[in-house]
Amino acid sequence: MEKEIISIVYGNTEEGSRYLSTLRDREESVQQEVILRVEEILNNIKEQGNRALIEYTNKFDSENVNENNLCVNKEEIEEAYKIVDKEFLEAIKLAAENIRFFHEKQKKNSWMVTKEMGVILGQNIRPLENVGIYVPGGTASYPSSVLMNAIPAKVAGVTNVVMVTPPSKDGSINPNILVAADIAGVDKIYKVGGAQAVGALAFGTETIDKVDKIVGPGNIYVAMAKKSVYGYVDIDMIAGPSEILIIADEEANPEYIAADLMSQAEHDRLASSVLVTNSLKLAEEVKSELTRQVESLSRKDIILDSLQNYGVIIIVDSIKEAIDMSNKIAPEHLELCVKEPFLILGDIKNAGSIFLGDYAPEPLGDYIAGPNHVLPTSGTARFFSPLSVDDFVKKSSFIHYSKEALLGVGKKIVKLAETEGLTAHANSISVRMK
Amino acid sequence: MEKEIISIVYGNTEEGSRYLSTLRDREESVQQEVILRVEEILNNIKEQGNRALIEYTNKFDSENVNENNLCVNKEEIEEAYKIVDKEFLEAIKLAAENIRFFHEKQKKNSWMVTKEMGVILGQNIRPLENVGIYVPGGTASYPSSVLMNAIPAKVAGVTNVVMVTPPSKDGSINPNILVAADIAGVDKIYKVGGAQAVGALAFGTETIDKVDKIVGPGNIYVAMAKKSVYGYVDIDMIAGPSEILIIADEEANPEYIAADLMSQAEHDRLASSVLVTNSLKLAEEVKSELTRQVESLSRKDIILDSLQNYGVIIIVDSIKEAIDMSNKIAPEHLELCVKEPFLILGDIKNAGSIFLGDYAPEPLGDYIAGPNHVLPTSGTARFFSPLSVDDFVKKSSFIHYSKEALLGVGKKIVKLAETEGLTAHANSISVRMK
């Protein structure tokens, strides 16, 4: 018997709750071998700089890259503009404009409060100075991700946004990526990838300046390298397998829902697509639509794998129950395909990005609406947030007291310091109280 | 010859710049043994829950703790209020009030923008639901840290703030800690510590609910356990050795500066205290003051060790040069002991907390001013920030489009999706454009 395209289960059964743990267990285990290899690469970059960087790049990516052409030059970018599809160019420009518009709204001001007797307290908010963006090569090389990572950094005011991306065999970079980087305002692009590129950004080499933070997706080597340098520099979250959850009522459109489930499923065999609905009729219709639509899709094999292993339709008694389930799963993408989606927005506790109504499918958010598509995956929306301008700033607090104000609280500070056994702390106050 | 209490070096010399790398190399290396031990403890907690938790607690902390008295009860808290010093109680209440005042200013609103044709974009900001705070036992058990970790969480609106702290041999908790926790609004207190407490918070046990985020300082076992569960839950930063940097001009007060350098030095032998000044006269005076004042301090041995190994006075040509040096070091605490400190505040790029003028010594910020004392250490102020309300919220973006609005951008989305080879993404738009 052929495996069904997707399972339909009831939410209040063991089968239904078992699904939640399947979702959590999608992580691929990282082999010790990979970790050791990554550490070796990072050490070599730290110690030998460019020499090791070029060696790895020649070995893994292209023999045409050397110290002198490591950095993409102006001519290469001009050439890219000539090559790319004009409709693509227009589309990516609109996307950039919308992303910039949304992220501008996230900017925060430094602030200060003044109190009596010359007490001044505040918080300065400043952009990071140097940020590195990793962009994968090959088929996972997405111009949209270049925009989503670089634009928030530039909006935050980061002075130097540098991009690293592995070159093709001939030493060139995908022109779509070059154009996207240029439109996003990336300051420099280097033709390096893998753990060696992460090492170069974290430690610096003769050519590449060290950065304060590294963001962007990559394969397991890149992810492990980022994890390893964390603390030495900042990183964004390490993304796990991604997911969509759709809450739909009886009036939702099965054709749309099937299409949206598959747009998630095509990403990756570990991607998870979940529909939670109070309508068995809708569930059956979505299932038929999946079977029908998948035939015309180029990534059919991945979609089928993903739907069969990590896709599910869960039948619940009410939309309230669907919301509770969604809050437990904390999906990366959540579509609310119900009659009045805004009325339940306030009930959604955990979700990376929420898509309201029939005409806000996930790909709208992936590409053009403006909010970031770098989102917390695998249930981490319980505590992580979409990539934003906040990720490219740092805060400093500041304190000013007058002598009078300090004298007013001096004895209390001394008491607290002494209670904690920190007499030098107490002394720092006492010398000012004489 | 006896070792000098602190070295005076010139900034523009090799000796001066060598100091910067000494500062960076303060990290203690973590033994493989510790990592393996922590993993074993975490696994046992994950698999056996309370049974393992009680076993470890009986072994490491107290034999008087069992499943029934794991959670501190109301009577214990009432008893603590009776025992504690009344002046301490008043002081900690003022501190809590000031911390609450400052952190209230950090709260952010959810927001939304509406555009033409029913386009609605926004960002919901919501508190985390469950937060765990680690509070060390023994001499590193600081009531002030309880306030600094718990109050921002409660101000953010976290429903359940639970605290874990290792009990004394007799099964009791330091009453100062209990009172601070109660004043800060902590919802539950459990008598467990070490890696096992971190495991209980991350995975949950029969008694302790799993949380979304774990914050608070701890020994190397606690730090490694937090690092290990990161991603499964969120954590705050892993703090390294801490530091103060004081920028002072010729008019600064050497007695105050010496006292402040030592208030940092007493924390820990790896703590670093740095004075950068354009006045050799001040440098010499501070050195004499250090020698004089240290005699009366209870933690003299730690202070001497710390000052001799990681303390330094750096002589520079100008305050501008001092600022450049400070921006490179990115100190956790920065005191600006200059005539007009506000005039250089804008030049400070990297610092955790900035103390302005002669009457804002570091202990004022450690205890009572209001800004958080959990700060980025070891140069990480380049990219990390003080603990704040932002650390206890998560964001979700949301998108609504009307059919008309989607049709307006549909072709561009399809183009972008097809360029990236994601035909199911394109399909999700196409089915809506028929």
Image (spheres, coloured by chain):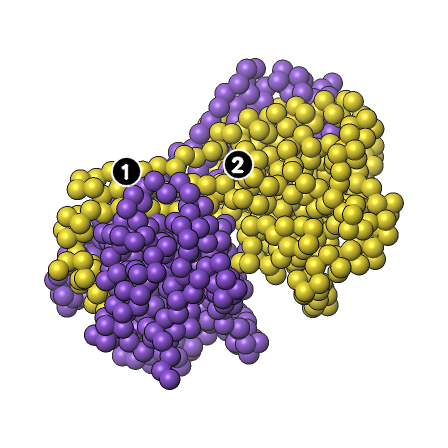
Chain colours: A purple, B yellow
> Circle 2 sits on which residue?
B157
Q: Residues within 10 Å of mark 2 (few under 14, many from 20)?
A: some
Report the label total.
2
Tag 2: amino acid = Gly
Closer to the camera in the image, B351 or B329: B351
Q: Is residue B375 left or right of residue B134?
A: left
Q: Where residue A17 appears, x then y in whole percent?
A: 51, 62
The residue shown at (55%, 39%) is B158
> Circle 1 sits on which residue?
B113
Instruction: Quadrant for the C terminus of chain A, please.
Output: top right
Element class at badge 2: loop
| Protein chain holding label 2 | B
Instruction: Quadrant for the N terminus of chain A, please.
Output: bottom left
Q: Which badge, 2 or 1, is on the more N-terminal residue? A: 1
Does the rendering let one see residue B281?
no
| Protein chain holding label 1 | B
Q: Is residue B25 above or below residue B274?
A: below
Q: Residues within 10 Å of mark 1 (few under 14, many from 20)?
A: few
Q: Is residue B246 above or below residue A12?
A: above
Tag 1: amino acid = Val
Q: Is residue B18 left or right of residue A74?
A: right
Element class at badge 1: strand
Q: Residue furthest bottom?
A: A1
Q: Where residue A399 appears, x then y in whole percent?
A: 55, 28
Q: Where residue A170 appears, x then y in whole percent?
A: 27, 79
Q: CA distance from mark 2 to mark 1?
A: 24 Å
